[in-house]
Image: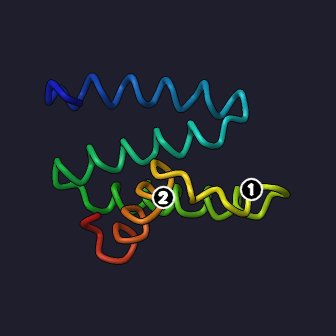
Amino acid sequence: MQNHDDTHARQELERALLRSDKLGQQELSAKAHYLLATIARNSGNLVEAKDDYQWVVRTLDTMKKEPGAEKLLLRSDLKLMYEESKRGTQTGKG
């Protein structure tokens, strides 16, 4: 993503997403969806971005409900991801 090679970044993220889903790593899946949403938003695909942002919000909301995870969003990285994803689901702009 830093090199603005969105096609390659998307491919790598989709591979990482498959691995994280297979391993049940919800946090990594959420990060991959968040980054995919960012790529989609930056390329003007607001519908796809909104779908990925919604996935992030649903996943983090589910994770917060797990025992002992009530303070999940105190982590600055997850809080930022959650807040930007919430905005992205409401406006499509993130």
Three-letter code, disc 1: Ala
The residue at the point 60 percent across, 63 percent down is 58
90 sits to left or right of 41: right
Whichever of labels 1 and 2 marks the residue nearer the N terminus, that label is: 1
**Contact (Cβ within 8 Å) of mark 1 with mark 2:** no
Q: Position of residue 32 (x, y in %)?
A: 46, 38
Measure how far apart labels 1 and 2 are at the Cα level: 13 Å
Image height check: is 70 above or below 81? Answer: below
Badge 2 crowding class, 10 Å Cα cut-off, few under 14, some 14 to 19, many 20 or more, is some
Q: Disc 1 designates what residue?
A: 69
Q: Position of residue 92 (x, y in %)?
A: 29, 69
Image height check: is 39 above or below 41? Answer: above
Three-letter code, disc 2: Lys
Q: Disc 2 designates what residue?
A: 79
Q: Label 1: state its secondary structure.
A: loop
The quadrant where residue 67 appears = bottom right
Q: For the C terminus, which image quadrant?
A: bottom left
